[in-house]
Amino acid sequence: MGGDAAAMTAASQARRARADLEIIALEKGRYVSYAACGIPYYVGGVVSELDKLLIRKPEEFKQKQNIEARIRHEVVGIRPAEAKVVIRDLDAGREYEEPYDELLIATGAKNVRPELPGVGSEGIYHVASIDDAKELREIMEHKTPKRAVIVGGGYIGLEMAEAFLRWGVDVSIVGRAPQLMRNIDPDMGALLSDALEKMGVHLYLGEAATAFEETSGRVAAAVTAERTLPADLVILATGIRPNAALAAEAGIELGTTGAIKVDDHMRTSVDHVWAAGDCVETTQLVTGKPYWVSVATVASKQGRVAGTNIGGGDASFAGAFGTTITKAGSIEVSRTGLQETDLAGGELEFASATINSQTCTGYYPTSEPMTIKLIGEVGSGRLLGGQIVGGAGAAMRINVVAAALEAGMTAQQVAELDLAYAPPFSSVWDPVLLAARQLSSKL
């Protein structure tokens, strides 16, 4: 069930394991195996052709791997007792059943659509599918909108702001939260806000959208309690949640996060039913607690594990730290592990260290400002998480922090790492090392 990262990775891995399996992928959309993360960059014109986002087409899966990918086929029911799924052929308008020996649920996440007056107006979009990408790019190329309002200040909100700025559109972001990107701490979010405002983005944070005005059925403005913002185009970047309703209806256990509960082999609570990707719950590796994260890297790894096991192998997925990265214009932001707001309950005594530095040696012409924040556990000295906001070359440093978390390193051990140096890339003491040293002195 599904046709993107987790589903098709699992299908491919199962095929490598066993040539005799009949493998069917059921996808309700028009595309399988596409780079959803690239949609904002196609809309913005950074990626020139839509086909570059299509990793493999259904006919290629059939020809190269003997995997049957049925597009426009939506699973509308799961019957574990009968080992069948109920499928709706959206083009033919009929329903039929398909038996299975092993079922993988990889239904992803679904957009949160606010139930607000006018939300059904023409010109209001989510950014989730290749169809969305095609339509938005055509609008940018042929209808030349002047004003766009983005509702939501997370990853999609930031990336779409950059996309519209590239077309010369006046961009406003409306956000219920008082900061951009709630998965970084407020002090780091403030740096992000400053950078976007310097780019010309209008920020209205702490203001929830309450309605959308329309003219002749088309959106004309986004409304908050404080103001009315004229708009030729509105993007709903109001978050996502696990698409787990069908699983729950079939009696498959959900976890505390509302996603499908699986073990480390991606097995669900029902025999012969597996799940992977954005619809499943995993483990936060710092805390060991249930966790839900929606990123392609995790989905692909889970799909690989599920496919290996379905094919008769033995693989496991331990969990995730929640390492993520994005950019808007020239500003980059990344994070991993825990942040201070995660630790507000007092279960762990922690300290943090924040340093302001440069992306490379200060005298080198490409040097840009960068802020690194590291968090660690008092007493043990264990590193708990990190966040980075800065110019080009800043954000990928988060991978050093993620690797340190994986290794269970202390801040002092991170401070002693042998990291590379040359003036175009870093200072003699890389800023990650300086932040770790400062944090260690507090722990």
Image (cartoon, rainbow, N blue to C red):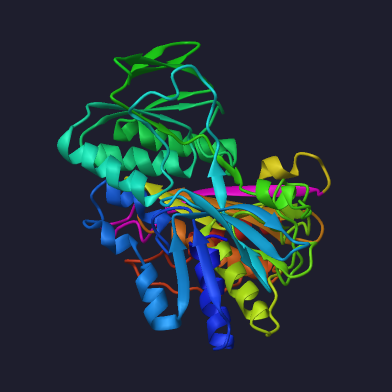
Q: Position of residue 33 (x, y in %)?
A: 43, 64
Q: Position of residue 433 (x, y in %)?
A: 55, 63
Q: Eyeballing the image, is 153 above or below 361?
A: above
* Foreground residue among 424 and 280: 280
Q: Eyeballing the image, is 128 above or below 395?
A: above
The answer to whether residue 11 of the structure is visible from this angle is yes
Which residue shows up at 44% across the image and 68% down it? 428
Q: Eyeballing the image, is 199 above or below 307?
A: above
Question: What range is drawn magenta here?
Answer: 348-370
* Foreground residue among 398 and 43: 43
Q: Quadrant of residue 144?
A: top left
In the image, residue 361 lies in the stretch drawn in magenta: yes
Quarter holding the N terminus is bottom right
Q: Position of residue 99 (x, y in %)?
A: 64, 68
How many numbered circles are shown? Answer: 0
In the image, residue 140 lies in the stretch drawn in magenta: no
